[in-house]
Image (cartoon, rainbow, N blue to C red):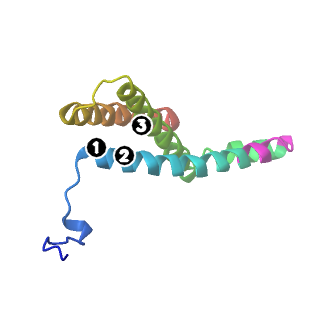
Amino acid sequence: MKKNRPVNLDIGTIRLPITAYVSILHRVSGVVLVGGILLLLWMLDISLRSEEEFNSIRVSLEQPIYKVILWAILAALAYHLVMGLRHLIMDFGLGETLEGGKLGARLALFLAAVLIILSGVWIWL
């Protein structure tokens, strides 16, 4: 039996809802966190070897590129944490409808953005 339904294979023309973007970014932030944790553990290992290496890590973290990397790790952590809390709230039965899911996604995105901005201020000041 042949189906006459059109098949859209152009991913650029598909409009996903905000909940899909939030979910995809939640997964991406988890992957970034794994890499970030490995990097931070490596830096901790180096800093514990000697006082000179501790000071070299401390001086390195004052450079702008390392601040950006640290901010990216904290941004991924903030985003992943807020979206994880959103999922926990949904497990209690809140925001399970289509409109509730969209509202929850928008609120979580706003809260994550605020935390990301605050973490940037904390690092750069």
User: Looking at the image, which is closer to me, 88 or 49?
Assistant: 88
Left or right of 91, for residue 43:
right
Residue 100 percent coordinates (x, y): 22, 30
Verify CB contact (< 8 Å) between mark 2 and mark 1: yes
Left or right of 115, for residue 61:
right
Residue 18 percent coordinates (x, y): 25, 45
Would you say residue 102 sits in the magenta stretch?
no
Query: Which residue corresponds to the image point at 18% horizontal and 77% vertical from the top-left?
Result: 2
Left or right of 59, for residue 84:
left
Residue located beneath label 2 in the image: 23
Residue 68 percent coordinates (x, y): 51, 49
Q: What stretch is highlighted in magenta?
A: 43-51
Q: Main secondary structure of the magenta part?
A: helix
Q: Regarding mark 2 in the picture, which secondary structure is present there?
A: helix
Amino acid tagged 3: Ile
Residue located beneath label 1 in the image: 19
Amino acid tagged 2: Ser
Residue located beneath label 3 in the image: 116
Amino acid tagged 1: Thr
Label 2 and label 1: CA atoms lie apart by 6 Å
Q: Regarding mark 1 in the picture, which secondary structure is present there?
A: helix
Label 2 and label 3: CA atoms lie apart by 18 Å
Q: Regarding mark 3 in the picture, which secondary structure is present there?
A: helix
